[in-house]
Image (cartoon, grey):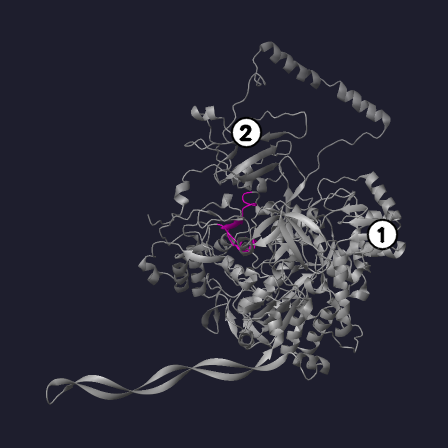
Amino acid sequence: MEAFNDRNVSNGYYKLDIEDYPTTAWGKFKRVVRRTFRGELFVGLWVVMREMIKFDVHTVQYPLEKMPIGPRYRAVHEMKRLWESEAERCIGCGLCEKICISNCIQMDTKIDENSRKEVSEYTINLGRCIFCGYCAEVCPELAITHGGEYENGSEQREHYIDYAGMLTPLEMMTQGKQQEFEGFGAITPHEDAGVKKTPLSY
Amino acid sequence: MSNITINIDGKEIQTQEGEFVLNAARANDIFIPAICYLSRCSPTLACRICLVEVDGKQAYACNAKSKDGMSITTSTENIEKERRAIMEVYDVNHPLQCGVCDQSGECELQNYTLEMGVDSQSYTVKDVDRSSHDWGHLHYDPGLCIVCERCVTACKDMIGDNSLTTIARGSDPLEAVYKEEMPKDAYAMWNKLNKSVIGLTNGTDVLDCTSCGECASVCPVGALVDTEFMYKSNAWELKQVPATCGHCSAGCQISYETKHTSVDNPEDKIYRVMNEWNYVSLCGAGRYGYDYQNADVAKDETAFNNAVEAFKKADTIKFTSTITNEEALILEKLKEKFGYKLVNNEAKSFQTFLANYATLSGTRLYSSDLKEVANSNFIVSIGAALKTDNPNARYALNNSLTVNKGAGLYFHPVNDPIINGLSKNLMSIAHKPLQEEAALYLLLDLFADKEALPSDIVDYLASFHSTKTITVEETVKEKVIEIVKEMKLNEETGLEEEVEVEKSKMVPKKVSKEVEVDDNRLLSLLGAEDSFTETLEKFLKKKETFSLMVGADLYNHPNAKNCARLVALIEKYSAFKIVMIPTLTNTLGVSLINTLSDDEASSYSIGYNIKGDFTLSALGDGDLDMPAINQQEGTLTSINKRVNPTNVAIGYGGYVLNDIANALGLNAELTVDYTKELPTSKGFKAESFDDLPNHYTNAGVEMRGYELKNMGRKSSTDESVSKIDEELALNENLIYFANPVRQFSEFTNKTTDLDEVSGIYMSEEFLSNSELNAGDSVRVKSDNGEVTATIVSDNKIAGDIVLIPSFDSKLNLEALFSGYRFATASIEKV
């Protein structure tokens, strides 16, 4: 209790040994001169010079070269298709629209000719998106996910992508190249163990 | 009914004797789960989840009546077990498609499944084919249906269409082990549920009803959905705008649910209309007629300046009653300032009728409202096409008939199969037009206190009575002794021989008797059936509360003044309480606020929602645009004598009446600044708009705006009424000025979902007996005018009176009438 009762917060703190700020004009001038002509500047310049000459480059040569992106990286969204039928996974439940904390997802749904719910419009305003991953996490169908595409520089503050732009192209499906997202919302190992089975009369 | 105290979970609460425990609990914010129960309707007992313990015995809260000193426990271990089992049963074979279900987010199955903590399933039954049905304006998915029968109950007890029923599901019986294993009530509920789904009573797969959509509104799950709304939006995306329906005088509580139109269009759009279905029921127009806004209006300065000029020039303002109280007050203030004549024929006749009634009754307003009608048990309607003039009046009548064991009389010349179908305890009397006074006299004759009634009226009523001798055939059982020959074995001889035996038996015999009976000529005048007196006697058993609804046929009657006085006399000398059905949305408000003049020739007139020399129109077809009711804030006065607030659902970019008034020298920033200035001398209160509530409490108390004060006035001692003019009756080739189901005005006609065809409406019976066919173009000619229109076949009316609607003003069908709603006309093919 002693520790709680002692409200002298300065205990355990110590003061840095910082010289006082110059107050006179002459003092200030002396400080500028001292800082300007220190040799540290040339130390830095020498490092750059040395590395330039050695051609042993450690930085990534972007945009010629790109870092590999991890499977859990949260960049521009993708809309996945079902492996079996190649149909769109999105059922238009609107949970991503609801959960989006920066309010950047909007969708329109309607009834299609087969009396099923169809997404007629779907946009994400990347200018607002903070790539938090909630939409991917909430999606019950693993339809909306993040992808590895992070180059979404734009001249305008508002930058929309639409449904068709996010959807896995069909040729990618035929080649079997659709990548499952391993980040938020993905199925975790041993998921089956936690499932309570519903009995059936069949 | 007396006040009693009951104890729920240790809390002492006050309630009425005989009130259902569930309602008493709800009124005191005590939660008892319930799915199938609808306030105002009779308990269905389908879900059984409202199980409680009353004085140690299990009972259903929705049909257990409160008794003084009762002690109720809402939850015991056994009850919890039952409730959990019930929710598990509801989840059996329920598709896991919440993601696409329209009800998701406001689904009672979702809510209660979570509430009861159902996280696993222990019961199973083989499912049957339950594919969905398109019933026209509704979509039914039996797969999602939990057969709580709320739709059936609402349709039967509130609406009266009786269009829905339960039909066989055709499934396998439940496994026998469940009967032993399962909690008792859960098993019983499942056993019933497993045998039924919802179907239509008309045997087809398309609904043929008055299309109110109340069934979809009460559906706790996504089984019944409005076809138009299906898959359009999730419930949680919609913004609720509390409002008052602007189509008829019922002034129903509604909330417009709005959202941006689409991804490309951020403009707000109304997606659907919802209501507090436990306390108010909508009609088809209220529910589906929401997009009548005056869209895409910008401020047109030239038109506005023209309007101001026109107001300076005009001497008359014509308007309809589809305006708010505040607008009516602005018009009245302009009239005071500039001496305009305000012309509104329909409100004028209502105003005059009210005034004539008031001179005898001593109150400015009628005494009752629709809630009281629903709670009374003997109802008479005179002079109103109840089904279409004010659907809520019909619901109130039906509610009394079905839930309150009520009975009623419906006096109207037009035969109405919907009204006739409400109950067998309702008798329709199709009298001849212009004989409404006879119906009023009949009520005086049957129900008035003859001792108190002025003697000349008593004498007049007595003059209708005579005794006549009729021959009655009676069946009397008579003892007849007959001698029958029988074969009998003679024991001595061993031979069979004929013996005569005397036998007596009772034989029914028809006897004609001459009986003296009272003959009431009023009945034959009204064309009532011979059995009227007998049926009425049956109807009147155990009836204590009486209501009389009167409608627009009386206001525009040539002897309207006499009708009004008779109505006042009925109220004064009998147990009847009166409701008058105002003709249009705000007719009551207008007739209280405005000083109206007769329609006379004018040099220059302004028309508001009606054609004038300069027309202001919320329909978008005038010289200056005005906002429609769903784009305005303001108050509307309803049939229940309430001043109900309504809010802006859809934005409006143009000028409003207040802008014109300000340009002409009045000074108010907003139209609703006038709310607190509504005339207190007429019963309004000086309350500002923002202080008006618009909701119902858990006890069902209407907290909407405020109720008008029924101001007293000096009543006259002259109680004379004139006699019936029997010659006046209209006989043949009748036309009647009324709208078909779901239509009220040009505004309902403008909406996309209400697709009634404009034309003149004839019953199927009439069409099959004539040479005319639906779709024919005909010329209708009356003493007042002539119009050409198309014939529409309508199975919601019967008989041979032709319905002439007003909802399409382009046809100008009003020209056929001279005030009174009936006329004679010739109809010929062109």
Stretch in magenta: B206-231
Q: Of all residues shown, which one is farthest toward the left?
A: B493
Q: Position of residue B807 (x, y in %)?
A: 67, 50
Whether residue B175 is situated above or below residue B720 in the rendered picture: above
Q: Secondary structure at mark 1?
A: loop
Return the residue nearer the eye: A82 or B704.
Answer: B704
Return the residue nearer the eye: B603 or B743.
Answer: B603
Disc 1 residue crowd, few under 14, some 14–19, many 20+, Cα 10 Å: few
Whether residue A118 is situated above or below residue B407 in the rendered picture: above
Asked if one can make out residue B145 in the rendered structure from this viewpoint, the answer is yes
Disc 2 residue crowd, few under 14, some 14–19, many 20+, Cα 10 Å: few
Return the residue nearer the eye: B220 or B559.
Answer: B559
Question: Where, by quadrant of the figure, is residue B419 drawn?
Answer: bottom right
Asked if one can make out residue B709 in the rendered structure from this viewpoint, the answer is no
Judge left or right: residue B701 versus residue B201: right
Disc 2 sits on a residue from what chain?
Answer: A
Identify the residue position indicated by label 2 in the image: A164
Does the magenta portion include B230? yes
Q: Position of residue B157 (x, y in %)?
A: 54, 63
Whether residue B620 is situated above or below residue B376 in the rendered picture: above
Whether residue B571 is situated above or below residue B106 in the rendered picture: below
Q: Position of residue B627 (x, y in %)?
A: 74, 47
Question: Where, by quadrant of the figure, is residue B567 drawn?
Answer: bottom right
The majority secondary structure of the magenta stretch comes to loop
